[in-house]
Amino acid sequence: MSKNLDLQLRLDGFSVLTEYECGRAQVAIESVARSEKPITEIGGRLVKDCDLLALARDLNLCVRLSGESVRAFIAPDRMAGFCCYGFYRYPWAMQAFLSVWQSGVRLRPSPQLSIWIQGLLFGYGPCAVQSFISSASFGRVSKSRRYRDKHTVRRYRVEIYGSLVQHVLRRNNRNDRSRKHC
């Protein structure tokens, strides 16, 4: 079996992520799922050259193959024209990431906002912060609740944020129009 054919077999099902990136993704997923790391950013891409939906499918496949209970994200990077992607476990971790990473995404005010900041400042782990948020009087306990608004698109177990939402929606509209004409 040739080296190139062997490489293709190992990457079967992935269209954007390389073998190396898939390996990094698995390590990142395990660090979020099994340790005290609330979120991890593992890579980035130039937006104009990236099929964001294919990237979302690849990230989703990484999560599915891992068997862990985490979610992936794709968000605009601080560097214009780039996106970053990674994994998280708790909704508050994604809110924290968005609030400090991106100035363009505005979060709705939430009573939970100060709780997760205080929890991290006082040295509590992500699981303890989530347990406190869930037990407080903010509604039912749910690990599946995620922050979503007009700045978020969800594909599989991957959430796409900020200005990338419009990029994905425009691409979907173009694809829908081309399918109707066929």
Image (cartoon, rainbow, N blue to C red):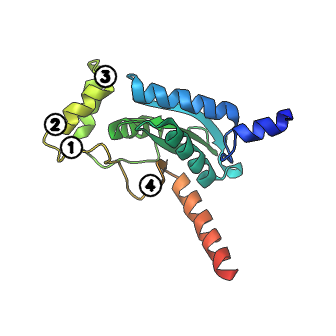
In the rendered view, tell whether residue 162 sits above or below residue 30.
Answer: below
Spatial CA distance of label 4 from label 1 is: 24 Å
Q: Residues within 10 Å of mark 1 (few under 14, many from 20)?
A: some
Task: Give the labeled residue for mark 3.
Answer: 125
Q: Secondary structure at mark 3?
A: loop
Task: Report the quarter where the C terminus lies.
Answer: bottom right
Query: Looking at the rendering, which quadrant does residue 116 occupy?
Result: top left
Residue 141's disc is 1
Marks 2 and 3 in Cβ contact (< 8 Å): no
| Residue 37 seen in the figure | no
Give, as a three-letter code, the residue at label 4: His
Bin the neighbour count of mark 2 within 10 Å (Cα to Cα): few under 14, some 14-19, many 20 and up: few
Q: Earlier in the sequence, mark 3 or mark 4?
A: 3
Residue under the image location 37 percent in, 40 percent down: 95
Do the residues bearing badges 1 and 2 touch, measured as CB atoms within 8 Å?
Answer: yes
What amino acid is at disc 3? Gly
Q: CA distance from mark 3 to mark 1?
A: 18 Å
Q: Which residue in the rendered view is the most extreme toward the bottom?
A: 181
The secondary structure type at the circle numbered 4 is: loop
Q: Amino acid at mark 2?
A: Ser
Q: Which label belongs to residue 151?
A: 4
Residue corresponding to mark 2:
135
- Residue type (three-letter) at the residue carrying disc 1: Val
| Most foreground residue, 154 or 79 | 154
Q: Nearer the viewer, residue 63 or 28?
A: 63
> What is the C-alpha distance between the residues marked 1 and 2?
7 Å
